[in-house]
Amino acid sequence: MIWDILIFAVGVQLGLVVTLWRLGEQRQWIDDEREYLTAWRDDLFRMQERIERDRRGGCGR
């Protein structure tokens, strides 16, 4: 009886540890993707500004 409770409790703890670990991995992946997409967006804005500046005839050099 006591062993059943202990085994159950250990199983629950291991399940929580694995779940939290996986959530941490997903959080890191989300942060990495957010950083990549932010850099990509910033590059697009810089390209757009350059195109608009070139269309006006001043390349700024």
Image: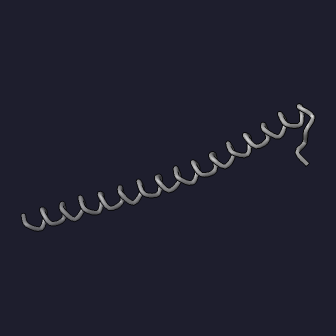
Q: Is residue 26 above or below residue 7?
A: above
Residue 29 placement (x, y as % from top left): 53, 53
39 displayed left or right of 46? left
Which residue lies at the image location 35% right of the left edge and 57% below the top edge? 20
The residue sitting at the left extreme is: 1
Q: Is residue 33 left or right of residue 55?
A: left
Q: Front-most of 9 and 46?
A: 46
Q: Nearer the viewer, residue 40 or 20?
A: 40
On screen, residue 44 above or below 22? above
Relative horizontal placement of residue 45, taking residue 51 as reference (left or right): left
Q: Quadrant of residue 57?
A: top right
Q: Report the quarter where the N terminus lies.
A: bottom left
Display coloring:
one colour
**x, y percentage for residue 17?**
32, 61
Q: Position of residue 2 (x, y in %)?
A: 7, 66
Q: Nearer the viewer, residue 42 or 14?
A: 42
Q: Position of residue 34 (x, y in %)?
A: 57, 48
How many marks are shown on the rendered structure?
A: 0
Identity of the residue drawn at 69% across and 45% down: 42
Q: Residue at x 46, y 53 (%)?
A: 27
Residue at the image position 18 percent from the left and 62 percent from the top? 9
